[in-house]
Structure formats: C-alpha cells, structure tokens
Image (cartoon, grey):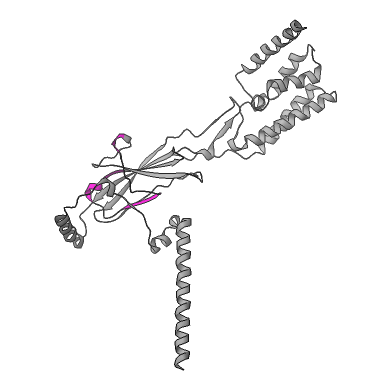
Amino acid sequence: MALLALASVVPSALLALAVFSVPAWACLLCFTTYSERFRICQMFVGMQSPKLEECEEAFTAAFQGLSDTEINYDERSHLHDAFTQMTHGLQELAAARGSFEVAFPDAAEKMKAVITQLKEAQACIPPCGLQEFARRFLCKGCYSRVCDLPLDCPVQDVTVTRGDQAMFSCIVNFKLPKEEITYSWKFARGGLRTQDLSYFRDVPRAEGYLARIRPTQLTHRGTFSCEIKQDQRPLARLYFFLNVTGPPPRAETELQAAFREVLRWAPRDAELIEPWRPSLGELLARPEALTPSNLFLLAALGALASVCATVLVWMFFEWYCSGS
C-alpha cells in the first residue's frame, strides 16, 4: 500500500513542477494552491482517473488569459476572496457531476468580470519619488512593484536678492502616507549645484516641509536638499539651488556692517535655515501652512479675542451704569 501511495504521489509532484515552470503565471497560480486545484480535478474525474492530467491542463489553460493581469496592490485581499469563492463553487459543481470542460472556462470568465470591478491601480506621477499609492500586484510572477522612478527630484532654481528672504517648500506632487513622515534638510555650500550627497551637510535647525533663510547672504549660495522619509525609509529628495544676486538694500548695508564689525558675525551651517514660524498674514496667504496645530492656534486666538472684547464691553457697561 505504501508503494502504491508513493507511486501516485510522484507523478502528481512531477506534474506540479511542470505546471509551475510555465512562463506565464496566471492569477490562478497566485491565489490558489496546487493541492486545491488537484483536489478539484479529483472531484471532477475521480481519485485515480487517467483524465487527471487532462483536467489539470484544462484548469490552468482556462486562466491563461489572466496571466498578464495587474491590479491595485490594496485589492489583493478582495481578489483572494474571489478565488476562494470560485474554488468552493467548482467543488459544488464537481459534487453535482458537472463537466470540468464547461466549469473551468465559465469560472475564468467570472473572475475576469471580478477583476474589472476592482479599484484600478493608480498611475505613477513623474518625475521622482517612491510612490506607494501606485504599487501594483502582477499575476505574471505573483509579485508587486512600484514606479520605476528615481528618489532624487530635479534641481529647482531659486533666485533671491541679497538681504531678502528665501523660502523653500518640500512638497511633492504625489500622495504621501499619512503617518510617520519626517523632513530633514542639508546644504552643499560653496555655490555648488549638485545632487551628490557626499557634498551635503546636515542643517540641524531645519524641521518641517517649509524652511526659510533671512536675510540671505552670498555665503548661502549653493544647493539645499530636503529628504522626505516615512519611518526612516526615503520617499523623495528635493533639491533647491539658491542663487543670491545683487547688493542688499542700502539701509540694511550699513546696519549689517556695523553688527558684523562689533560682533564679528560669521554665518554657520547650523544658522542657515531657521524654523519657519509663520505670521498671521503668512498663514492666510499660504493655505498649505494651515496645519492642524496652526488652525488650533488661530481658533484659540479668536476665542481669546472674543472673550477680551466681551469683558471690555461688560466693564464699559458697568462703568456707564454706575455713573448714571
């Protein structure tokens, strides 16, 4: 009996290797196991039927049309559930003495209809960045992939007159994850226009997606880099080449010269970028600056102003009534 069991297992194993070695891996092979497919064929034609091999070949052939299917990565669970329901349906047909020649093509057509109803994979947005929202699952190979785009974005040119303010916005044109997003800034001094990370040094005081320099000096001429990360995984690197031109305003020149002479002021990398704390006018002028914390502060200021106005009106009314 043991020899008979072994003899029945070996051909099945060899057949499984033959099926998995085909170049076109259909969605069927990604979301069902060989044992599940073999069991369905046994139910259709019998445990030791000579038609087992024919049944298995018909099973895989019916789903070859799904071999090049790509779906939204987040839809994998839905497609897996659909294949699970399909296998249950085929088992019921086999138990009812149905024909696998009819059942397999019909099941494949139903799965095609299910796939067309899934949420489509989103297109990649050039020119750069690790765009998780556009990750796709490929049935041809049963693996996922993201956009084939570099992490480094093209260098943006920023020209500022000496003594004025320079502003950098570390914003990408694709959707970022909602959690654990951090921004880090670096500077390549000496007027370099580069994306070579070996030339960059950290700017510790710079935090958040907005940063500014004021007043800009000739020593600030160079490339600034902002790296966006999620949980220490880089998502994109933006570069800004700051070109400082022209003399500063005349009124500032004498004042700055006096301060430098007295304090012997010299710019340091740590003082290049200051944390951006927007004024009320800047908040209203820049919608992207209205973060939840800034909105809370604005609401708190409005409430405080309302309370103060109410108290002043009440005090005036009390004073007026007491005088009468």
User: With 295 as the anchor, is 6 left or right in this view?
Assistant: right
Return the residue nearer the eye: 54 or 217. Answer: 217
Residue furthest to the left in view is 261
The percent coordinates of residue 57 (x first, y second) are 71, 17
User: With 284 as the anchor, is 68 left or right in this view?
Assistant: right
The percent coordinates of residue 16 (x first, y second) are 67, 15
State whether residue 147 is above or below residue 67: below
Q: Is residue 129 one of those drawn in magenta?
A: no
Quadrant position of the N terminus in the picture: top right
User: With 42 as the anchor, is 114 left or right in this view?
Assistant: left
Q: In the figure, residue 204 lies in which quadrant?
A: top left
Q: Is residue 243 visible?
A: yes
User: With 58 as the anchor, is 207 left or right in this view?
Assistant: left
Q: Is residue 212 one of those drawn in magenta?
A: yes
Residue furthest to the bottom in view is 324
Q: Is residue 123 visible?
A: no
State whether residue 305 is above or below residue 164: below
Residue furthest to the top in view is 3
The percent coordinates of residue 227 (x first, y second) are 39, 41
Residue located 49% across and 39% down the image: 131
Q: In the figure, residue 287 lies in which quadrant?
A: bottom left
Return the residue nearer the eye: 19 or 269. Answer: 269
Return the residue nearer the eye: 227 or 109. Answer: 227
Magenta residues (range): 198-223
State whether residue 296 is above or below residue 179: below
